[in-house]
Image (spheres, grey):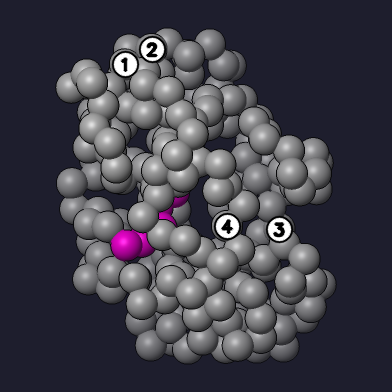
Amino acid sequence: MPPTKMKDALVVNEIFFSIQGESSYVGRPCAFVRLTYCNLRCSYCDTEYAFEEGQEMSLEQVIHRVDQFPTDLVEITGGEPLLQEPVHALVRCLLDGGKKVLIETGGSLDIRNIDARAILIYDIKCPDSKMAARNRWENLPHLKPQDEVKFVLGSRRDYEWAKEKIRELDLDSRHTVLFSPVWNQVEPRQLAEWVLEDGLQVLLQVQLHKFLWGEKARGV
């Protein structure tokens, strides 16, 4: 990952205002800051454009853009936002400014330095992602009660694997657990039926933004 020229700067792929499409905050207006670069290559990735595309912005510029949107909810995503060290300063500034900050991370990097006031949407990679070997299991004890754990499911095999991990790690008693079907690979109705049959205490999410604006739309 190329360094930025400025110490307090980030390489930003896009900043936009939309409806939160995932997590327990689904449906809420939200400001999104999508950072560039990712260290993973998930088989189902729908944001490959964030691997390299982006422009350098100072923290002040990012915060100014976010402040233009009429919402107190901000999500920092990617790519993988934790790859850029200045993200921690951005998170602190947003929180100090009264924002509620969500951070979506792929779960392969250390989370211990993240401001405890932020809420993590922590993605555990399932086998079909081809990235399950990159899961950093030692992060789990550092998750806070308000953090949410997400499984993106590409098949019945992924579902059974996730179900076993929830049981093994007692995740559903400590966190909101999110189940998300891979677009065009697992039907949401089928996933809902599996969840009901097994009586799982999880939150089914269906990427609302794709239903509203389409699979390929950017900046939504």
Q: Is residue 158 left or right of residue 190?
A: left
Question: Which residue carries the number 2 mark?
Answer: 61
Answer with mark 2 or mark 4, whichever residue precedes in sequence: 4
Q: Is residue 20 above or below residue 141?
A: above
- In the picture, residue 92 is in which quadrant? top left
Tell me the magenta residue range.
102-108
Provide the residue designation for mark 1.
Answer: 58
The earlier-in-sequence mark between 3 and 1 is: 1
Residues at marks 2 and 1 touching, judged by CB atoms closer than 8 Å: yes
Assign a secondary structure to mark 2: helix
Image position, residue 138 (x, y; %): 22, 71
For this rendering, which residue is in front, 96 or 76? 76
Q: Nearer the viewer, residue 78 or 170?
A: 78
Mark before the other along the chain sequence, 2 or 3: 2
- Identify the residue at image location x=37%, y=29%: 11
Q: Which residue is mark 3?
A: 206
Residue at numbered disc 4:
45
